[in-house]
Image (spheres, coloured by chain):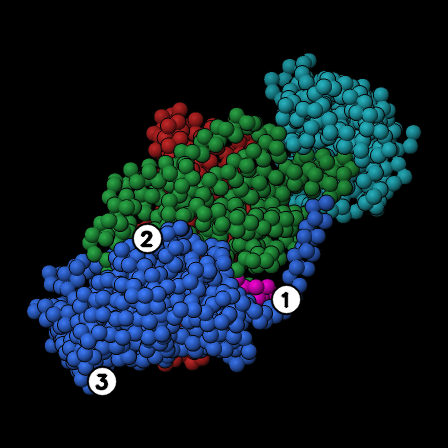
Chain colours: A cyan, B green, C red, D blue
Amino acid sequence: MENLLEIKDLNVIYKTDEAIVHALNGFTLSVKKGETLGLVGETGAGKTTMCLSTLRLLPDQVGEVVSGSIKYRNIDILKASKKEMLKLRGAEISMIFQDPMSGLNPVMRVGDQIKEVLNLHFPDMSPKDKDARVDEVLTLVGITPERKDQFPHQFSGGMKQRVVIAMALVAEPKLLLADEPTTALDVTIQAQILALMRELKEKFDSAMVLVTHDLGIVAEFCESVAVAYAGEIVESGTIEQVFARDKNHPYTKGLFNCIPDLTSTAPRLTPIPGYMANPRDLPKGCKFANRCAHCTEKCMAAVPEMQEVAPGHFIKCNLFEKGASGQ
Amino acid sequence: MIKYTLRRILLMIPVIIGITFLVHFILMISPGDPAQMIVGPEATLEDIEMKRHELGLDQPQVVQYLKYMWNALHGDFGTSWFQSFNVMTEFSHRLPYTLRLGFLAIIWAVALGIPLGVISAVRHNTIVDYALTVLSLILVSAPAFWIGMMYQVFFSLNLRWLPASGASTWRHYILPALSLGGGVFATNCRTTRTWLLDTLRSDFVRTARAKGNKEVTVVFKHALRNSLLPIITQIGVNFSIIMGGSVITETVYAFPGIGSYLINAVKAKDVPIVMASILVVAVIVGITNLVVDLMYAVVDPRVQLGGK
Amino acid sequence: MRKGREKKMSNTASKKISTSNRKGQMKQVWFRFRKNKLAMIGLVVITILILACLSASLYIPYEKVYTQSIRDAFIPPFSEGHIFGTDQFGRDLFARIMYGGRISLFAGLVTIGIAFVMGIILGGSAGFFGGKTDTIIMRFCDILMSVPGILLSMTIVAALGQGLGKMLIAMSVSLIPRQARTVRAAVLTLRGQEFVEAARCYGTRNSTIIFRHIIPNVMGPLIIGVMSGIGGQILQIASLGFLGIGIAPPTPEWGTIISENQSNILFYPYLGLVPGLFIMVAVLSLNFIGDGLRDALDPKQKN
Amino acid sequence: MKKLLALVLVAIMALSLTVSASAAAVDKKTVVIATAQEPTVFFCQDQNYSSNQAKDSPVLFQIYECLLWMDEQGVCQPWLATGYEMSEDGLEYVFTLRDDVYFHNGEKMTAQDVAFTYKLCMEKNLTLTRNLLINLADVEVLDDTHVKFILSEPFAGFPAETSARVGFIINEKYYNEVGSEGYNNAPVGTGPYTFVSRVTGQEITLKAFDNYWGGKAAIETVIIRPISNIATQFISLRTGDLDVINSADVASCQQLTARDPVTWISVPSAMRVHITFNMRPGLNSPLEDENLRKAIVSAINKDDIIEGVLKGEGAPLDMSCMPAYTGAPEAGTYTPSLEYNVEKAKEYLAASNYDGRELRIICQAGTNYDKAAQIIQGQLLAVGIKAAVVATDSGTFTASSTAGDFEMGINGTSSSLFDWSSCNTEYRIQAVYGPAYPGEYAQILDDLCAQANVATDPAERKAITAQIITIVNENAFNAPLYNSTSTSAFNNELEGITLNPNNAWRVYNWSWK
């Protein structure tokens, strides 16, 4: 199965008035056709920046791709023409944003906002078909079609997120970037939304990158997972490989310690000490050095190599160098 | 909608009564005896007394006010004290001129202000943005009469393109409309830029882009549509600025509207004319505010009329 | 070991953060304000203007404002002795503009001051107490705002007669409702917020709530309103002067200078250009400052 | 879509601006006249339509005519009357009228119309009758072309009265049909132009009267436009939108260059400007002190004032009356007012008990008197007298001068009759506020003025007026300043433009080159 999306060594910076923020530093990631990849990491790890760079929606004059490449099927996103990108967005790749409250245009009817995607990408489809398509996708996400003439402010948070999902999937995109789609929702709604997304994914056989900081969701819904820290991928592999917890990047191990485990008797969770590296002046070597218990001179000196500890299971840490013992 | 409009019109009545009473009170407590002024210095005491009685000035202020409003209700604005003709006929001639000039000024100010505001918001922090900011701030800062005079000297005297005074042909309207609309154009441009900048940063604009919309559609169909609310409020406020500004522009260009008429009446303390003008202006400003509120509901579904 | 170090580090950090925060907040505003080039130009220009006008009595003897010499009327600018030339009665234009500036700027500040204070009192109490007081004050403001400002001040000045004091009252009357409205809107939004409920919980008196909690938070929009407001007031004085009901001659004031020489401007344009430019520059710099402050005080505006 | 709309609009604006308009081609048939104030009242016989000389005369003198016309020198020439005889006792005047005069509504003018005009005025316009129809008792119709005026007491200046705006002859039949208001809205006179329309605030249109007795006027249409802004007036004149500016601002006239297609004329007017001192008994005004008054009079440099206000176009006066008025004293028969002499002024000031307080000079804001007041304030300051200019609107000015809360007042008084009678009113004991002069002078001046009114022999009248002026000047009861001018600026293609002292002019005499 060839890769649908290949991001190689992507570096992205934000030029704000005060300073330059290094959002992505050598970000490499690939997604296969129909695969559901969970992208995990703390806030500020560059997850949203990755999605925006893939759609080339970085804020102009501020966000800038310094180096690296993004390839979607055979199109090089960074060099694609404006027209090509317009055809891509919404049809081939579509995105679901985090906050449902402000994701919809408050002065446009919900139905029209969905139909807009069809108007853009299926101009020759007859209006009657378009309406039918909108009704169909609305029922799919669990909203009665009669409500399509209502306005966003007449919907609850959960319902709005369903509309956003409908909008993202109506054109049956090949790749769906979901940027923490359920964070703003409470747990009960969260489960429904995720179940819905999985069902639709199968139906349209589209790949999905589910960006979240909740390992529980990744374990339950994704096939593979990538752990992002300070703008780069520190570990990636299948759910089984990573969640087996025998070989993990120290940061991933720290993340696992933060999850309350029904079986363990530990009175307290052990948070990861220290703070995320400051994106304005990143350390030379491994970004996790200042918080890593096994930090060595080598780690501080240079960025560690990505090591393949098992077929498809990569960890970017000197501990797992060929011949190293691995703790 | 109709219930709301009716309620608003009823609400306007106390406001209009309030402002007319305030103005009448101020004019009446002012020093100087109007009757004496009208009859002139050579008149005898009986002349003055006869005039006072004729104008009803010997009655208490409140009674005079009520009498005036009662007549005004019946369309009789009384006769001007110093020029002895019916105020109503004068107004029916002059009001159309002021309204025409006002509309012309607002139309060009909006038609140019909003697009340029959009351009300076989209091209944020570029030379275009700075140039438009400085231009609009200059137009807001320069006194209207000074600009009016400069236009006159430049356009009609040096270039001989346009007439400097009067209102007989449409070309007479250009210079007054330009100088009257200057300040309003600037505020429109500034408001559009500020609010559009705000909306361009919001999430649904990013969603619109993610759907594959072209930048033009994103800016106009999504972003601008959402910042129409404050822009329309600004247009409502503009109209009352224009009514104020017309006093000056009409004096500079000898334009036969109620502006120049009002300033002479105020100076000579010709009470019937001042009262009639304040009444008419208050009604016009009241109506424009009502129209602006009604447009809120049209523009933004979240606004329920009556929930004001 | 690590636990101890961690706790100590966290509370010193929090203390450092809070103090630097308040100072930082002001520094932050100044830092963003300083970045706005136009606003800085405005600030520099207006300070020079105010200083020049206030210290006018140091470098120009007061009589020069009134001494006439009919022989040398209409001397062009930059001739010796008269930097800006002379007006129709041969009075030195430079002296008249410098002393006139005092009245224009002073009157602008005073009217804004009155409107600022009245705005806080009226708007604050309307917003905070709500109910009957709110409706009465707001209906009163509606009445004053139902007619454009200049018409109202024009009628008041013409009725009460000319004079600096009367004119200041007339002009601030048309400004008070606008300021009161801004304050009321800000107070209404703040009143609902938790920190006001909290203050009320531990029994603070209403007045302290208003002046210690609400008003400081209302400062942002108010200051912006004041800056552009002063500009508007200077224009209004000039316009009243132009209409002939401004400050009575021979007292110098920028607007009156233009209207006095109205008939000569055609042939001696400098008589109109110079005072007009002074008005524009003063109001322009005030608007720049207002603009800069709006961006600095309103964090959302950060690009 | 919006940007497209904006571009289109900008294009239209630019296009309309570039539409080059050459100066309006000189239309030989029309003349456009600008006046500062809009003429609005065209019926002088009714108090309710109290027409004002300066404001309404541009229209009145084109559509109406009087028995006599006052020429540039202030001498009355025959107009609707060919001549008049005065009885020996000076109580009766018989005027012989022309018999070929028609009103605009086709009616023939007869002596009956003339008698009706004056009787109506005496009945309905008391104020104007008191000022302009002095001593007139009755009017009798002798026959179609002769009418007799009977005076209660002889008055030398009577013939001039018939040339004032009171003497505009109206048609009795038309008046009985439409009444005062009707007449005012659609006036009918015998003049060379008929009233067509008045668009308020914009223009008044007059058309040449076909069967005017003196032959149809050269210029077909007259348009009068009110423009209060002086700068706008002169811009429109120089761009050709206007042809004539009535009572043009002298300072602007002097700036006109040869390049402009415009010339201007200036004629001494009937207006005399002076300072009145407030010496009314009971108000203990500082000006009751004679030395202070003398100090003020000798501190005033009239030439500087004339230069500052009228750019040298006026003439200084040494008495508060015009030498050209009928009945005014001859030069040399009276003591002139004090000469400008700073040392003498300081001496008088030292001798006076002036306590240094500010003396208020009241005047009407925005007028030439306002400028004069500011110059005088400067001149008084130079001598050590502090003065404050209180410039107010006309209403407040009248109110404060009647109430007496002023020290000095600057105003100009004109005389439609071009006769001493208008100076008289200043020295009579006023009905409204009583005597204006200290001590016994009030009664002496009042008696002398009464005699001046009735004296029929011109020499005898001049002797009395000389006595009055001598008393006034010796006690410095007022400070005469200057005789103003009436000016008119017009397109130099126009010829025949003349002004009489009351700034009245007749388009009938004008024509395009």
CA distance for labels 3 and 2: 42 Å
- Which dot marks residue D497? none
Compared across the picture, whether B232 is left or right of D500 comes to right
CA distance for labels 1 and 3: 56 Å
Q: Which residue is mark 1?
A: D21
Compared across the picture, whether D458 is left or right of B124 comes to left
Residue depicted at x 63% and y 23%:
A154
Figure check: D332 above or below A75: below
SS for callout 3? loop
**What chain letter is assigned to the residue under label 1?**
D
Query: Which sits earlier in the primary sequence, circle 3 or circle 2?
Result: 2
Q: Residue furthest top?
A: A263
Q: Which residue is mark 2?
A: D48
Residue D79: x and y in percent read 38, 72
Residue B174: x and y in percent read 59, 57
Residue depicted at x 29% and y 76%:
D482
The quadrant where residue D449 appears: bottom left
Residue D426: x and y in percent read 20, 68
Q: Amino acid at mark 1?
A: Ala
Circle 1 crowding by C-alpha within 10 Å: few under 14, some 14–19, many from 20: some
Residue A152 in magenta stretch: no
- Which dot marks residue D331? 3
Q: Which residues are magenta?
A: B155-165
SS for callout 1? loop
- Which quadrant of the figure contains the N terminus of chain A? top right
Give whichever of A165, A123 is nearer the camera. Answer: A123
